Image (spheres, rainbow, N blue to C red):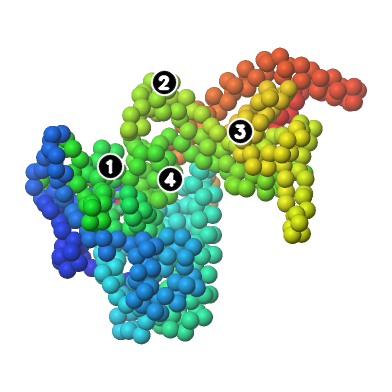
Amino acid sequence: MHRPTLPIQSLPAWGRLNGVSFHNINVINTEGKGYGVVSNEDLKVTDETTDALHLLTVPHDLVLNAAAVEEYAKEDKNFRQLLDVIGHRSTRADVLLFLLVQVVLASRPSHTDVGLSNPWTEYLQFLPETVLVPTLWTEDERLLLRGTSLEAAVDAKISALDAEFEQVREKSSDIIAWNDLLWAEGVPVSFTDWIRLDALYRSRCLELPRSGESMVPCIDMINHSATPSAYYDENPKDEVILALRPGVSISKDDEITISYGDSKSAAEMLFSYGFIDPVSSADSLVLLLHPFPDDPLAKAKLVAFGGPPKIHVARRVGEEGGGGSSSTTNTNKNGPVGWTSPFAYLMCVNEEDGLEFRVLQQTDGAQQLRVFWREEDVTDRTGDFETLVRNHPLAAVLRLRVVTVVQGALQAQLERLSAVPDPGDAPLQQREDCVKTAAVLREIEMNILEGAIEGLEDEKTTLLADENVVAYLGLTEAAESGLAGDEASNEPDDFS
Ligand SMILES: C[S@@+](CC[C@H](N)C(=O)[O-])C[C@H]1O[C@@H](n2cnc3c(N)ncnc32)[C@H](O)[C@@H]1O
């Protein structure tokens, strides 16, 4: 789809027309970060200053969220029809549909049968053509993510976006007016247009204290820093304001920044914003854990668990390891690495340990899967097997199984991450920014995985010395030698 654009120099005029007030700031092109906001005066807020120094005020009726889309639908009966068949699933889905319509209206100005233009129809024309989030990377560029925690996440996101786009296409095609506008006239909307809208939404939406998840024009021109000079808020009139932080001095032409959060991992930063700030990103990652392929209870365990089976690995902030200290910026890059994986505990227990699944017939004829642990109904506690196994006589053995499984999964991930991909015959076409950002992500994740594996190895050594574990392994070995006779193996129990 052809997308008209507007020069950023026209943004102040758009702002004046729509009630946005800029105080002492300009929106300009910054080096390597797209647009950004700079001060056009020296500014200072002392810690004693009681009134916040406002840099930007955006009226409430420009705030875009599910409620705003609903208001818009009240004025446009055609859009109401579209929203009612496709929307109302999430704020994101409603806003994406609204954005799609605005982009199409801007690209087909002669088409006046459906859709009402509004300030967002024009504002979208100021936004950058592309965002460096991995859903918009080429296939060659996505190879750079091999072995990182984003590899599977990006593939899954692209599949989900594809399914979502097909649904929008299918349902809107049934409405003649929208079919003409979206799919039949000129260059139709493409899947890439949909991915781009999703990327714009993800990289520009923010959480307002009262209005919740929203897009706010002009506030979304402010870049991130680990040491931000400003913050946004809602005032009593529900306007969104940008204000200078207490104690901050700004020189003319200095960039004004906010924080996009200091608890997001490097992978989340790259996924949502297309860049990584190693100083403010949390040292953590999330991997999917696959159940044992030969476990006859695997399916039941997944259903009973009810969510994606994951391992969450994170450096423990505030604890000293080889050095470093923690603060709001995550400078502690050497502390111990911990992990959590509620599913690993469920995955590692079996019938002989006391796990049982029962299918109960309900009065309405429906069937219900119930989970029992040592005769107790724990259907509502499948995410809490770490606690449940603690009272088991073989608790240390069960913990050893879990530690071994988690360590194996992290080791396999580290090996995949460390492998140098075969470049193949054709030279790969990869943008330099993607190469650099992927290298940062790889190094951060390698470091976290190595730290976690080291900690797990230490715990395994401790558990292997536990008297219950020693006795259990002795019994297992004796049973095996009894059964296998001369072929008895001295291999330790296979905890995987
Ligand atoms: C909310 S927008 C900010 C305005 C944006 N720069 C633009 O051109 O419209 C967020 C996007 O800005 C860019 N960005 C923000 N802070 C950045 C930073 N510290 N380093 C690199 N890029 C940054 C990223 O592309 C991110 O997806």
Q: Is mark 1 within 8 Å of ligand 1?
A: yes
Q: Secondary structure at mark 4?
A: helix
Quadrant that contains the N terminus: bottom left
Q: Which residue is mark 1?
A: 225
What is the C-alpha distance between the residues marked 1 and 4? Answer: 16 Å
What is the C-alpha distance between the residues marked 4 and 2? Answer: 25 Å
Instruction: Look at 23% across and 53% down and name the residue there.
Output: 236
For marks 3 and 2, the one nearer the N-term is 2
Q: From the viewer's side, name the closer residue of 7 and 116.
A: 116
* x, y percent for residue 382: 65, 40
**Tag 4: Cα neighbours inside 10 Å, few (<14), some, or many (≥20)?**
many
Q: Is residue 436 above or below residue 390?
A: below
**Which of the labelled discs sits on residue 320, or is there none?**
2
Instruction: Look at 39% across and 62% down and name the residue there.
Output: 66
Instruction: Look at 42% across and 60% down and name the residue there.
Output: 91
* x, y percent for residue 385: 65, 34
- Say what amino acid the circle numbered 3 marks: Val
Name the image quarter holding residue 217: bottom left
Q: Which residue is mark 4?
A: 268
Instruction: Verify CB contact (< 8 Å) between mark 3 and mark 4.
Output: no
For marks 2 and 1, the one nearer the N-term is 1
- Say what amino acid the circle numbered 4 marks: Glu
For marks 1 and 4, the one nearer the N-term is 1
